[in-house]
Amino acid sequence: MTHSVLLAEDDRPIRTALERALTLEGYQVTAVADGIQALAAAHRERPDVILLDVMMPGIDGLQVCQVLRAEQDRTPILMLTARVETADRIAGLDAGADDYVVKPFEVEEVFARLRALLRRSTAGSAGAADGGGQAAGPDGADEPGEAGGSAEAGGAYEALVADSGVVEAADLRIDGPSRRAWRGERELELTRTEFELLELLARNAGIVLDHSTIYDRIWGYDFGPGSKNLAVYVGYLRRKVDVPGSRPLIHTVRGVGYVLRED
């Protein structure tokens, strides 16, 4: 199946090189040079995935992303950014982007992230079409507690998974089919990646999931020990889940990974 990509990048050499590489990889590419053209192309062509540079003249990539999300357009968006500060990356996630790549980048990393976004988009569409259902654990298992990683002594507890696909862990409630989540009575506003990360942690509540397991389940690709991608997402997810005054649920196990549990 040929997937369509909308590429918005104002730097001509980068745009030309990416357009050529994506075409050789088998994608159908529409390449534009600014945010106004990007919005017009997104409305006109409805691409399968959008590759969006942050810094563009006129309407920048963050604004394009915000407009599309405000229109309830859920097309997967991969941001290209030369900004390396965590706050700048978080701005892209807050605008509704699904993932990001920091310049300079290897084109193979772009391909890997695009494949992961398209897999998740296809899986989400299939799940919605058949009414959802229980997601498998990181190693393909259906039961919580069977994923890669290790259970911490005295800290493990099982998530409750209803037949409807609703997961309950601590005071979290996650509705997989509708892709909605609550902590107590407060509904959480989550991006696609944040939702999938929280659902994975909740389904394996009390189990320490290592970095490789999480990368494999969420992105479908392990970006290696030097990548800060997972740490950024966990940090931003904590801002939404572990708000001041609430008991922290998402914990870092240094040198291993992350776990969702009540202390």
Image (cartoon, helix red, strand yellow):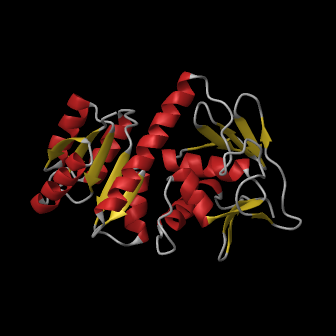
Q: Residue furthest top?
A: 130
Query: Which residue shows up at 50% across the image and 53% down it?
Result: 219
256 relative position to 217: left or right: right
Q: Quadrant of the N terminus?
A: top left
- Residue 11: which quarter of the image? bottom left
Residue 191 seen in this snapshot: no
120 relative position to 72: left or right: right
Q: Quadrant of the C terminus?
A: bottom right
Indicate whether 149 appears above or below 116: below
10 relative position to 62: left or right: left
- Residue 107: which quarter of the image? bottom left
Residue 31: image x %, image y %? 16, 45
Query: Which residue shows up at 58% across the image and 22% down it?
Result: 130
Query: Which residue shows up at 18% across the image and 56% down it?
Result: 56
Query: Which residue shows up at 78% across the image and 58% down it?
Result: 206
Pick whichever, 27 or 200, lies toward us: 27
Residue 186: image x %, image y %? 65, 43
Residue 124: image x %, image y %? 51, 34
Give the total number of marks visible in the rendering. Answer: 0
Residue 183 seen in this snapshot: yes
